[in-house]
Image (cartoon, rainbow, N blue to C red):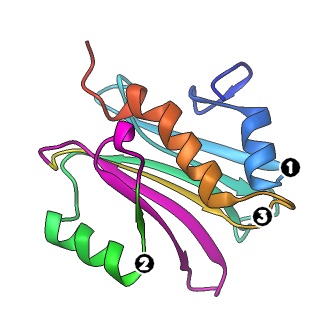
Amino acid sequence: MTAAPQECDLISASAIKIATGLNDYRAYGTKMDMGRRFESCTVSEELGPEGDQGLLIEVFEPSPISPEGLENTKKTTQGNDLPVELGPGFGARRKNAKDQTIAYVYGWTPDYKRLLSINIMEGAPGRDSLADATEFFRQLKPLLLDKPK
């Protein structure tokens, strides 16, 4: 998933194409602290400014969602806990403003100070977008959520 060539200095182009179903896309990454810390990566269809978003990865520090807010979101969207080895978090599906389904995973540090969010617009033929979002989380968590060694 993180093999070259990479988008946003993070994700392989082939993993993006497989998970989103987008062959022509634009990827935009942002970093904080003079480029030392990753903040977000947005992958959108290359059809002008209104192109559909295919993938959004964001790291928040501090988390904009309280522990209670995360629990309420999980209940509202009928989310399922992530596997134990991935730590606290859940995955679910929701509708966006355009009534499109988005599979997403929220995972956070045990102290709730950092939140990693992975969102994939469902649409890649034959793919389980929620499973793909969970796999992106599995591979990106050590890089983006866990404390640097």
- Identity, as a three-letter code, of the amino acid under mark 1: Asp
Q: Nearer the viewer, residue 5 or 105?
A: 105
Tag of residue 24: 1
| Residue annotated with mark 3 | 48
Q: Position of residue 129 (x, y in %)?
A: 67, 59
Classify residue 32 by image quadrant. top left
Which mark's residue is nearer the viewer, 2 or 1?
2
Relative to 81, say whether 149 is above or below: above
| Residue annotated with mark 2 | 78
The crowding category of the residue bearing disc 1, from other C-alpha atoms within 10 Å (few below 14, some 14 to 19, many at least 20), is few
Q: Position of residue 31 (x, y in %)?
A: 40, 35
Relative to 87, say whether 103 is above or below: below
Label 1: element kind? loop
Classify residue 61 by image quadrant. top left
Classify residue 119 by image quadrant. bottom right
- Identity, as a three-letter code, of the amino acid under mark 3: Gly
Tell whether label 1 touches label 2 (CB within 8 Å): no
Which mark's residue is nearer the viewer, 3 or 2?
2
First in sequence: mark 3 vs mark 1: 1
Q: Nearer the viewer, residue 148 or 74?
A: 74
Question: Who's the residue at 77% across and 64% down the image?
Answer: 48
| 134 in magenta | no
First in sequence: mark 3 vs mark 2: 3
Task: Please state if 58 lies on the left or on the right of 70 as rendered.
Answer: right
Q: Which residues are magenta?
A: 82-111
**How far, Cα to Cα, is label 3 from label 1?**
12 Å
Question: Who's the residue at 79% across and 34% down the image?
Answer: 14
Tell whether label 1 touches label 3 (CB within 8 Å): no
- Identity, as a three-letter code, of the amino acid under mark 2: Gln
Q: Nearer the viewer, residue 84 or 125?
A: 84
Task: Please state if 95 lies on the left or on the right of 4 as rendered.
Answer: left
